[in-house]
Image (cartoon, rainbow, N blue to C red):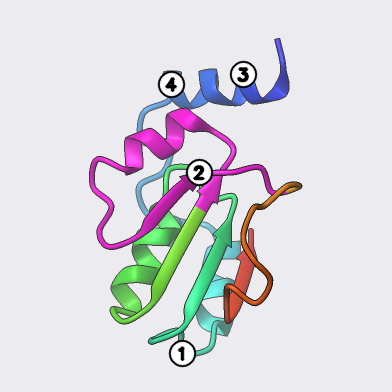
Amino acid sequence: MSIQERYNDWHASTVNYFENPLDFQWYQTTIRLLPDLNNLKVLEIGCARGAFSRLIAQKYPSVKLTSVDISETAINDEKKEPNGIDFRVADAQDLQFPDASFDFIFFL
């Protein structure tokens, strides 16, 4: 079984492994250090089920956020309630975006 298949299985078997990303120090630090993302095209790599994506979209209502993860299971769950976020399945090592597609990129 590949790592991607195991990751998909983990997402399929785990329900709401965390609901509030601010329970985690790295998200608290990131949200504090981010610039104003309103009106910027932003890429989040490794969004999992999108908890931090939703927080970013809420804090910066004019952000144009694209959130990617390699897990189809996680992304398909998020597409049900996108909240204006463009969720996509993508491999961080082989992103298929044209150069200069984004103003800001983060990967947590």
Q: Residue 31: give x, y in percent of width and height.
A: 50, 75
At numbered mark 1, what does the secondary structure look like: helix, strand or loop? Answer: loop
Estimate the spatial distance between the alpha carbons at disc 2 and disc 1, rounded to whole Å.
Answer: 23 Å
Q: Mark 4 points at which residue?
A: 12
Q: Residue 83 carries which label?
A: none
Front disc: 3 or 4: 3
Q: Name the residue under label 1.
A: 36
Magenta stretch bounds:
68-92
Mark 1 near mark 4, Cβ–Cβ under 8 Å?
A: no
Q: Which mark is residue 5?
A: 3
Q: Residue 90: give x, y in percent of width and height.
A: 59, 43
Residue 77 vs residue 67: left or right?
A: left
Q: Name the residue under label 2.
A: 48
The residue at the point 64 percent across, 53 percent down is 96
At numbered mark 2, what does the secondary structure look like: helix, strand or loop? Answer: loop
The residue at the point 43 percent across, 67 percent down is 65
Estimate the spatial distance between the alpha carbons at disc 4 and disc 2, rounded to whole Å.
Answer: 12 Å
Mark 2 near mark 1, Cβ–Cβ under 8 Å?
A: no
- Counting residues from the start of the chain, the first of labels 4 and 2 encountered is 4
Q: In this view, does 55 lie above or below 39?
A: above
Residue 42 vs residue 98: left or right?
A: left
Estimate the spatial distance between the alpha carbons at disc 1 and disc 3, rounded to whole Å.
Answer: 36 Å
Q: Quadrant of the C terminus?
A: bottom right
The amino acid at mark 3 is Glu
- Counting residues from the start of the chain, the first of labels 2 and 3 encountered is 3
